[in-house]
Amino acid sequence: MRHEGDGSLLIRRATALDVPAVLNVFDEVMAWFVQMGNEGQWGSEPWSSSPRRIQLVEDACALPEAWVAEDERGRLLAALVLGEAQPYVPPATEPEIYVRVLIASRDDRARGMGRRLLAFADRRARAAGVQRLRVDCYSGGTGELVRFYESCGYERITSFSVDGWPGQLLGRSLGAATSS
């Protein structure tokens, strides 16, 4: 089951047993969002109290490219789900891997985890012979999330709205000179 580790971080495939811990990470992030006044992204209710969101996490953890990152004690710090593009974005024009979910704990041990998991996504894409990744994110508030993806090598493709929720689609090409 173990896939990759560096002594302090282990990235492994997610299973149904990880759902409660992944929901806990979403709840941590939600509490942080509410504390900073960012209710526009996901609202204000914990994910673990929403049957619809619980189902989303259960479905995501069942996908073949669902991954979790845990520390040396086995504490789940982050989740990454790769796969097909979301239905609300324009279809891909070339083979791609889509970052469907990227979430990291607010715990200090998770610092830099988003970048590490995006580098892992790059490696998964290269291993699959794919040179393109896309991701979408919330583009409201301060735009900080869009800037995070840009700092990881993603470029803006198009803005969109889903029932008033402002989103940004971004993409990244993996060239021969790109390192992860």
Image (cartoon, rainbow, N blue to C red):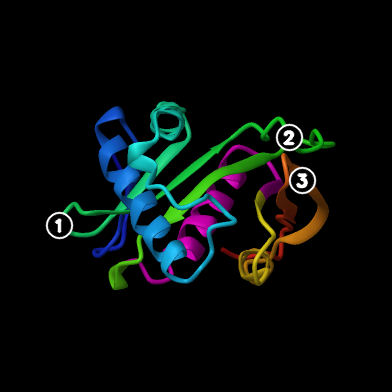
First in sequence, mark 1 or 3: give its number: 1
Q: Say whether residue 22 is left or right of residue 138.
A: left
Q: Is 98 drawn above or below residue 141 in the view shown?
A: above
Rendering quarter of residue 118: bottom right
Residue at the image position 37 percent from the left and 47 percent from the top? 46
| Label of residue 88 in the image | 2
Q: Position of residue 39 (x, y in %)?
A: 53, 58
Question: Quick check: 5 above or below 161?
Answer: below
Q: In the rendered view, does 85 fall on the left or right side of 10?
A: right
Of the numbered discs 1 and 2, the one sitting upstream in the chain is 1
Q: Is residue 1 visible?
A: no
Q: Secondary structure at mark 2?
A: loop
Which residue is depicted at the point 42% across and 27% down? 55
* Mark number displayed over residue 161: 3
Q: Which mark is residue 73?
A: 1
Estimate how packed mark 3 is, as few (under 14), some (14 to 19) or many (20 or more) residues with alpha carbons within 10 Å: few
At which x and y percent is residue 31?
Answer: 37, 60
Stretch in magenta: 110-135
Q: Amino acid at mark 3?
A: Ser
In the image, which disc is placed on residue 123?
none
Q: Is residue 106 magenta?
A: no
